[in-house]
Amino acid sequence: MTQPMPTVPQPVSPASASSPSSPSAPQVTVFGGARVDGDSPLYRQCVELGRLLGQAGFVVATGGYTGTMEAVLRGAAEAGAHTVGYTCTTFDRGFAPNPYVREERKTPVLTARIQRLAEESDAFVVVHGGLGTLAELALVWNMILAEELPAKPLVVVGPEWPKVINTVYAETQMGSSALRLLTLVETPEGAVQALAPLVFTSHAAT
C-alpha cells in the first residue's frame, strides 16, 4: 500500500542567505541527467535551482558535465557561488567538464565518484534524470538509511518523483523508515527552503 510522502515545513531563511558561497561553505550536490537541451524547461529550472542555492550561500556541486549538471552550475556561477564538478576518467573520451566548473574533483571510476560525492556533501538535491540519477539517489539514500553516512538532507524535486517513489515503495521491500528520509518538493524554491535551515543549523553546531 502506498504511503504519502512527508510534507516540507515552512523554513526560516538563514542570515547569510544572500551571500555568495566560499569553498568552506556547506556543499549541496545536485544529481540529474545529462540529456537535457539548453532551451528546455528543465534546463531553465535547473539554472534557477543553481542560482537560488548559490544565493543561499552554498557551495554547489554536480557531476560536472552536460544537461542538468551544466545548468545547475551555470546558475550557481552566475550567482557568485563556488562550484564543484565531480568528473570521472570513464567519461574522458566523450565529455569535458562544462565551463561553469570552478573546481574539478576527478575520480577513476563511477563507484568512486558517487562515494566521494556522498562523503563530501552536506545535502543532496535530485532532479529529473536517467539511470545514473536513479543509481545516485538509491545509493545515497541507502547509505543514509544504513547509517554509513550521517543523516543528511535528501530533497527530490519535480512532479514525476512522487509516482516513482511510491511505485518503488509499493513494489519492493522498502520500509516506511526509508520514506521518512526523503523530502519531496515541486520547485527549486521549495528545495532551497527545505535545505537552507537544515544545513546551516548543522554547521553552526559544529
Image (spheres, rainbow, N blue to C red):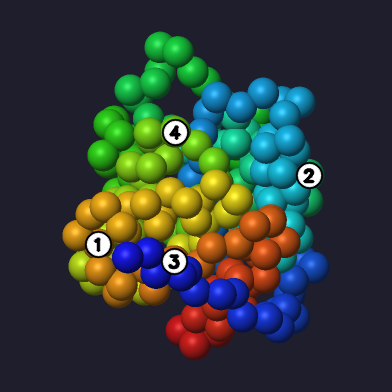
**Residue at the (76%, 26%) spot, across then down:** 39
Residue occupied by mark 3? 182
Mark 4 Cα shell of 10 Å, populated few (<14), some (14-19), many (≥20): few
- Three-letter residue code for mark 1: Met
- Three-letter residue code for mark 2: Glu
**Residue at the (55%, 24%) spot, across then down:** 35
Helix, strand or loop at label 2? It is: helix
Helix, strand or loop at label 3? It is: strand
Residue occupied by mark 1? 174
Q: Position of residue 18 (x, y in %)?
A: 80, 68
185 or 71, which lies in front? 185
What whole-number distance in Å separates the C-alpha atoms at marks 4 and 2?
Answer: 26 Å
**Residue at the (59%, 74%) spot, across then down:** 8
Q: Quadrant of the N terminus?
A: bottom left
Residue occupied by mark 2? 78
Which numbered disc, 4 or 2, marks the residue closer to the eye? 4
Label of residue 130 in the image? 4
Helix, strand or loop at label 1? It is: loop
Apparent side of residue 29 relative to residue 57 in the rendered image (left or right): left
